[in-house]
Image (cartoon, rainbow, N blue to C red):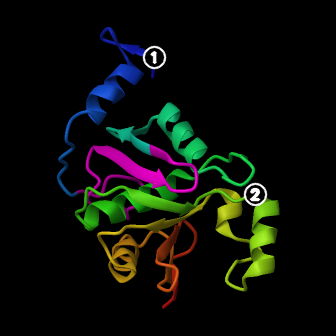
Amino acid sequence: MTEQHSGLSRRALLRAFAATPVVAAPTYANAFGFLRGAGDVRRIKMYNGRTGESIDTIYWIEGEYIKEAVDEISLFMRDWRNGQVKDIDTRTIDIATAAHKLMETSEPYMLISGYRSPETNAMLRSRSSGVAKKSRHLRGEAADLRLSSRSVSQMARAASACKGGGVGTYTSSNFVHMDCGPVRSWGS
């Protein structure tokens, strides 16, 4: 796809889409078969309390991922402790987006953890038995997310309904882990 289309840059087109409400009919919209309710436009909204950054971006239109938007999401979901960036697997972004749509909320996710460098993961493992040695966070395949308008249980049910990967429920810490690995669930 070229950078220019009908006199508009791709970035200008994205800004125009981002400024308008997105209404999409429920559909199985991708090859994985789990993304329900995402429609022809996929948009993700998140806030990172640790960095103070926010993201609200359309990353998929009419069957195509938008590389610049996916790169922006990867930068946003970097290891905030050391600034290391890894490409975030688009399947994880899709699961989070589909779950968000199923919950019918406009509130952005609070990102607790996206990509984790090996050093960060090792440090967290030394402090908690709940951190996996081969965490999907190390591969850019997981996100720990929170919503103040939805319970952990509601979030976990929405993510599980996508049948796209792992869903971990961390009620005492008030977040849900979503990843694009094998379908499984854990936690309380």
Residue 23 in view, yes or no: yes
**Residue at position x 65%, y 67% from top?**
136
Q: Residue furthest bottom?
A: 188
Q: Is residue 32 above or below residue 127?
A: above
Residue 32 in view, yes or no: no
Closest to the camera, between mark 1 and mark 2, is 2
Measured as percent of width and height from the top left, residue 77 is found at 58, 51
Q: Earlier in the sequence, mark 1 or mark 2?
A: 1
Q: Which residue is mark 2?
A: 117
> Element type at marker 1?
loop
Q: Is residue 162 above or below residue 18?
A: below
Magenta-tinted stretch = 27-54
> Element type at marker 2?
loop
What type is the residue that disc 2 sits on?
A: Ser
Crowding near the residue tagged with mark 2, few <14, some 14–19, many ≥20 C-alpha atoms within 10 Å: many
Q: Is residue 36 magenta?
A: yes
**Residue at position x 48%, y 91% from top?**
188
Does residue 10 appear left or right of residue 83 in this picture? left
What type is the residue that disc 1 sits on?
A: Glu
Which of the pair 31/123 is nearer the observer?
123
Measured as percent of width and height from the top left, residue 67 is found at 52, 34
Q: Which residue is mark 1?
A: 3
Crowding near the residue tagged with mark 1, few <14, some 14–19, many ≥20 C-alpha atoms within 10 Å: few
- Predominant SS of the magenta segment: loop
